[in-house]
């Protein structure tokens, strides 16, 4: 069923890939983004790849007047909420900004949705809400104990959404807890374009491969893992985007607030990623093991069976595909969308 979808943060990395899949699925898409860490060129690429148009409003979620104007202009069936600051290390340095942006911005969005009688929401949460898990793989019913301010802002929003759905039964909310999105669109036209030095591993590796950095810093080589480096569940960004399409299909049957993991369930160490990327690029990518990073956990990977059974979704692209698509994007866009 065709819907009119509002996507907050839609010009960003995961947001733009999701907008592409939404348009391909026949939905009408409007994007709200303050463009503080995104380039509107990503949405032009989305339009080129799909042959369809979308609407972009440069509005900050902390601006209730501007946001109200967007909702007043057009009716939306559902909101997909990506907008937020997302760097773990940065969140430990400027926590107040993270709480204000991620939590207050969401509160403004929810109040605006209520004002316009819209009660269907897909929220971009994060596996960081789990913190250090009691066992592996991580299931949705595990204790929630994030180890950094970024993760705590996500958990604060999750609590808010559960309380809201408990108090007002007309809400239908799905929270998607991503593990580690990576890669790019297979076309090579759409990818991750971070501002400054990347916070995520794969874009840092690919920028190093094209000579923008001398080497990759690997944070911690003394974890109790197979090779001493941190273990993560890397998931292709297209699989993450398709997870939102699956969530939309079941949202009308959802009452209250439900969380799902989006991951592969297959852990990879940092050195595994470096080896796969080096094979893809065709040369050894230099790296250096440095001290652990504040707020990181040793191991984190998903049990994705709940999403498979209830959303009829599963990740289908492996680490080699993520590296191949990321390299296709990076080598043709060494400076991102400004290339």
Image: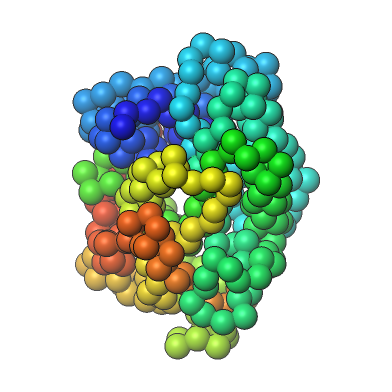
**Position of 194 relative to 75 (above/below):** below
| Residue at horizontal 56 percent and vertical 13 percent from the top | 72
- Residue 133 is left or right of residue 280, and the answer is right
- Residue 99 is left or right of residue 307, and the answer is right
**Label total for image:** 0
Q: Quadrant of residue 316?
A: bottom left
Please state which of residues 80 and 147 is positioned toward the viewer in this rendering.
80
Q: Furthest-right residue in view?
A: 96
- Residue 149 is left or right of residue 300, and the answer is right
| Residue at horizontal 58 percent and vertical 46 percent from the top | 256
Q: Is residue 182 visible?
A: no
Please state which of residues 240 and 323 is positioned toward the viewer in this rendering.
240
**Position of 320 relative to 333 (above/below):** below
| Residue at horizontal 55 percent and vertical 18 percent from the top | 71
**Position of 236 relative to 57 (above/below):** below
Quarter that holds the N terminus: top left
Relative image position of residue 140 (x, y in whole percent): 54, 66
Relative image position of residue 291 (x, y in whole percent): 62, 75
Q: Quadrant of residue 25?
A: top left
């Amino acid at each position: 069923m065709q819907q009119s979808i509002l996507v907050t943060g839609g010009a960003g990395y995961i947001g733009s890939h999701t907008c592409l899949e939404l348009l391909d699925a026949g939905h009408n898409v409007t994007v709200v983004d303050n463009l503080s860490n995104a380039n509107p060129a990503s949405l032009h690429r989305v339009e080129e790849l799909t042959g369809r148009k979308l609407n972009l409003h440069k509005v900050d979620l902390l601006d209730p007047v501007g946001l109200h104007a967007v909702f007043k202009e057009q009716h939306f069936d559902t909101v997909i909420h990506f907008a937020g600051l997302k760097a773990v290390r940065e969140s430990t340095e400027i926590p107040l900004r993270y709480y204000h942006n991620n939590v207050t911005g969401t509160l403004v969005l929810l109040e605006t949705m209520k004002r316009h009688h819209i009660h269907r929401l897909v929220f971009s949460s994060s596996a960081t809400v789990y913190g250090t898990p009691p066992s592996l793989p991580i299931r949705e019913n595990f204790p929630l104990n994030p180890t950094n301010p970024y993760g705590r802002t996500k958990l604060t929003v999750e609590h808010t959404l559960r309380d809201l759905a408990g108090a007002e039964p007309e809400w239908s909310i799905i929270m998607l807890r991503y593990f580690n999105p990576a890669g790019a669109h297979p076309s090579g036209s759409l990818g991750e374009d971070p501002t400054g030095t990347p916070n995520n591993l794969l874009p840092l590796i690919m920028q190093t491969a094209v000579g923008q950095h001398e080497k990759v810093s690997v944070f911690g080589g003394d974890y109790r893992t197979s090779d001493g480096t941190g273990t993560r569940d890397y998931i292709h960004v297209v699989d993450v985007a398709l997870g939102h399409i699956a969530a939309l299909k079941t949202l009308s049957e959802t009452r209250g607030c439900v969380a799902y993991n989006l991951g592969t369930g297959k852990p990879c160490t940092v050195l595994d990623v470096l080896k796969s990327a080096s094979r893809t690029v065709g040369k050894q990518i230099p790296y250096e093991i440095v001290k652990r990073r504040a707020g990181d956990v040793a191991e984190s990977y998903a049990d994705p069976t709940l999403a498979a059974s209830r959303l009829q979704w599963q990740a289908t692209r492996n680490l080699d595909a993520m590296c191949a698509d990321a390299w296709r994007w990076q080598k043709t866009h060494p400076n991102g969308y400004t290339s």
